Amino acid sequence: MGSIYTYNFPTRIRFGPGARHELAAELAALGIRRVLIVTDKDVAQLPWFPELKAALTDFGVATFSGVWGNPVVSQVNAGVDAWKASGADGIVAVGGGAPMDVAKAIALMAHHPGHLFDYEDGHCTRPIDQPIPPIVALPTTAGTGSEVGRSTVISDDDTHAKKIIFDPQLLPRVVLADPELLLGLPAKITAATGMDALTHLVEAFLAQGFNPLCDGIALEGIYLVAQHLQACVDFARRSQAGAVFDEATAAAHRVARGGMLNAAMMGAIAFQKGLGVTHSCAHALSTVFDTHHGLANGVMLPAAMRFNLPAAPGRFLRMAQVVQPGATDGQAFVDWIVALSASIGIPTSLGALGVTPDGLAALVAVAIADGCHPLNPRPVTETDFYAIYQDAF
């Protein structure tokens, strides 16, 4: 995998090892003169990050790295202050889902008045009618796929409730999807973000509604996860243990990371069809216990799929046959998820995340109000949410 490929869906994507080196040319093509790089504290410390900035000698460059955890409004507000101070006319989003979401929110609020949540999807009290600066995205994880998404998810600082802001103008203009930016990703983050991508793909395929385009993308994305996630985690474990890879092994690592990058983007494209109960459960975990979103999805996915299997056995069989061509029933897909989770180190119970049974009522209250489960293939009642969470213990 030495070439860099271009494909559009609809964002222009440049995919392949070394794609990050095209950043200056892409900024120039967009007419950008000064950029604000939005990233998180950890990415800003990586050895390749100064090299990325140093390549932008023809541009004014400022950096905002005040992003961490589940992003909140105060991070966005600080980023908007950095935007105004920098005099930038474009944004480069570098990192996982959190920096991507904060970058989009900064772009929205760069020229729009009021509070970010004035623009919440479904509860918008102000029009999105002002210019939104162009965004170029460089993903460093393979999970949310936010780099090809039209929305941003930001939490309230006090309640931790997640709010979704949606507008097609939030789509990055260009994605530089470079597998080399993921080679140093720790095994735990690789696993959690990979399960996030898988959850998007699975829930999109199961979601109610008719969208054969999304269904096809979801199935291919599930295939890519089955082919590459375990390998990515294994490579990460070996790297953390101090292994030095020969060129053939390093090339295989790049292939695996590239496969997961594409799977993550496909998940974000596919879930425009909808999501489901797993995400409602995970959003509640992030709200109540501040759990990492991908990890929350990974822990909840087996229980949620056991709940959904009776409502969509045919769909489960199709997914099972993608990951195990000889499968004869949908239970095989649920079993595959459980086995994959165990092998890549995803905790097997909510208790391992520090969740206690006395928090169930708070979790259910948030989950039942979440906007994802109405498209679940099986209706979910308050009693059902209790049962799903208890199964996850």
Image (tube, rainbow, N blue to C red):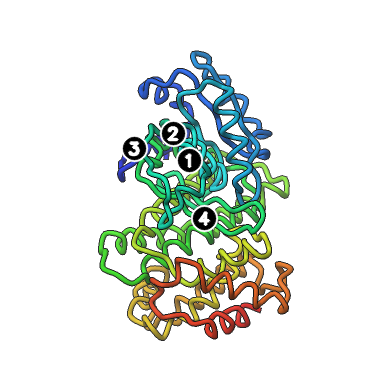
Q: Residue at x 39, y 59 (%)?
A: 271
Please report whichever mark, 3 or 4, sits nearer to the chain's N-terminal start. Answer: 3
Marks 2/1: CA–CA distance = 8 Å
The image shows residue 308 at horizontal and vertical percentages of 44, 80
* Marks 1,4: beta carbons within 8 A: no
Marks 2/4: CA–CA distance = 21 Å
Question: Viewer-nearest of labels 1 and 3?
Answer: 1
Residue 202 seen: no
> For mark 1, what is the residue?
104
Please report whichever mark, 1 or 4, sits nearer to the chain's N-terminal start. Answer: 1
| Label 2 element class | strand
| Label 1 element class | helix
Q: Amino acid at mark 1?
A: Lys
> For mark 2, what is the residue?
135
Q: Residue at x 64, y 35 (%)?
A: 65
The image shows residue 18 at horizontal and vertical percentages of 47, 31
